[in-house]
Image (cartoon, rainbow, N blue to C red):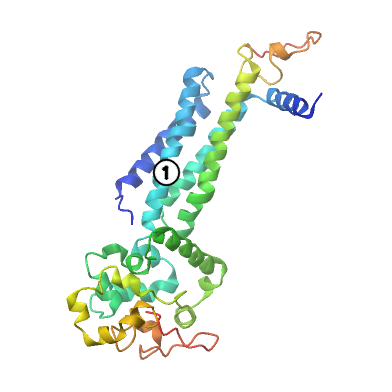
Amino acid sequence: MPHAGPWLGYLSLASALVAAAILLHFLLKRPKLDLRAKLMLLLGLGVFPTITAATSTVAGMEVTTHRTFCGSCHTMDDHFENATNPDAQSLAARHTRNPFFGEESCYVCHADYGMFGYALTKMGGMKHVYYYYLGGYRQMSKEESRRDVHIAKPYDNRNCRQCHTTTAHVWRSVPDHQASAAQLASNRMSCASPGCHGYAHPFSKGPDGLGAATSASGHPAAEHAP
Amino acid sequence: MTLSERARSLAIKRLRKYSVINLVRVACWVALVGLAVMVASILNPAPLTVIFAMSVGQVIGIVAFLCYLLSILMDIVRGSDHAPDAPGPAKQFRDPESPRDATGSP
């Protein structure tokens, strides 16, 4: 995951400002198109806009990993409020309070694990944007979204195992872990199941927080959904 | 005349027709629009502005740069005896019978 920091945004703004100054000087002062003017235009139309495009892309990609970005759609309001609630005891809230997850707690847990995880996660994010603006999610009330919006695919236990290794003695010494090791490895059982570590976002699983919520089609919420 | 020769002469004819300066000005305005879109994604990083900057904003920037490159190509085709803000053919391409002075030099 990128950690470019805010300086990248400042660099992007600075290069855009320099490019705009060059272009506006050419448009308003109308200097003679000699070699000097052509070289200045090469900077204003080529070099500085390229720097702006590259830095704004990296800065933009980094912004998409922030929790506030995920919470900017109203359908995620409940998830955002629960995750940032200092008194909440859900998996999401407890992990968000962990400094390792910090401002990127949604992304750290939900990013696909693996070599192409970053790109695959961003492609999945594009689907979210499509659903929100063109798939009717934007018009949904909070209650409707809580009932009808579900995780796209069962939560992969490998995302938990990025940090919680299953090879350490402490993990293997838990009898329930030993008994369920094969099911956990094959994703037939979720770490975030009720009875194990519990749902990450329990409020989204019905009034009792135990998975009683049903989708619009009448199907129960996915057992694996954290 | 072969097809490639015909295409080449047509391309040169078109390149000579328009003013280099006008094309550079168009490139500048287009680039300013592209820069505004990219800056908007930094100042207001909402989902749509970020996606818009990474797709449309960059395409606009590329179009502006291509306009600039085209203007350089036009300048080369016209030659050094032809002012960049003058429309029409350069001296070396002009019809010797034509009474019009199309150099446009001040």
**Which quadrant of the figure has residue A221?**
bottom left
Inspect this view and state whether residue A192 appears: no
Left or right of A7? Residue A139 is: right
Vertical placement of residue B47 versus A78, above or below: above
The secondary element bearing badge 1 is classed as helix
Residue in the image at 66% along x and 14% along y: B104
Q: Amino acid at mark 1?
A: Ala
Q: Nearer the viewer, residue A116 or B69?
A: A116
Left or right of B55? Residue B95 is: right
**Which quadrant of the figure has residue B60?**
top right
Which chain letter goes with mark 1?
Answer: A
Residue A196: image location, x then y, percent: 29, 86
Image quadrant holding the N terminus of chain B, namely top right
Vertical placement of residue A191 versus B51, above or below: below
Residue in the image at 30% along x and 81% along y: A181
Inspect this view and state whether residue A213 appears: yes
Vertical placement of residue A138 versus B15, above or below: below
Residue ID for mark 1: A54
Residue in the image at 51% along x and 46% along y: B57
Q: Nearer the viewer, residue B9 or A72?
A: B9
